[in-house]
Image: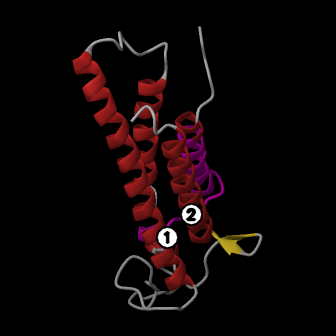
Amino acid sequence: MNFRISIPLIIAIYATCIILSAYFIEHVLGYKPCELCIIQRYPYYIIILSAIALFSLKSKTISVNLSLPLFKYFSKRAYVGAYVVIILASITGFSIATYHFGIENNYWQNFSGCSDRLSGMELNATNLLEDINKIEPNCSDPLKFFGLSLSGYNIISNLLIAGFVIFDLKKNRQII
């Protein structure tokens, strides 16, 4: 079997690691994500699926007879479509992460998703334990690793993914 590591495979593995680390932080470490944190995951799902599709199109072990003209026509369109979907998803993820990062650092106000939800709750000793799971996270105090919040890392990750896809697209111009 001819198995080569390619950029779409690297992107799929990288995006999967990002999603798995978000679930690890949420379910194992116990940090409850805000609404925007959850929304930031959606572009990664699209990136994973599109990168796997692109890898399977480029893989010689999965491809069928490339001598058929109709297959060549549709495979070229599928290549371009997968590249465009990954780039658009990473731009969307970058935009959401930048918006979230701005809210965390008080650059602009939030429309929804991250706010102090404790203001409307009546907290006392009798209902505190009952309502502790209803308390939603506040973006004014985000989880940080090495001084950068997770939305900051999402900004960097989406730029890296878009950069790798553009590099791979330029490298494979003759295919398209």
Secondary-structure class at tag 2 = helix
Work out whether mark 2 precedes mark 1 in sequence or the reverse, and give the earlier one.
Answer: 1
Vertical placement of 14 versus 6: above or below?
below
Q: Residue at x 62, y 56 (%)?
A: 25
**Quarter of the rendering occupied by the C terminus:** top left
Secondary-structure class at tag 1 = helix
Residue that carries the numbered disc 1 in the rendered image: 97
**What amino acid is at disc 1?**
Ala
Q: Nearer the viewer, residue 34 or 79?
A: 79
Q: Residue at x 55, y 41 (%)?
A: 171
* Residue 98 picture location, percent across and down: 50, 75
Cα–Cα span, label 2 and label 1:
6 Å
* Residue 79 picture location, percent across and down: 37, 36
Give the mark count: 2
Q: Nearer the viewer, residue 167 or 17?
A: 167
Residue that carries the numbered disc 2 in the rendered image: 154
**What amino acid is at disc 2?**
Asn
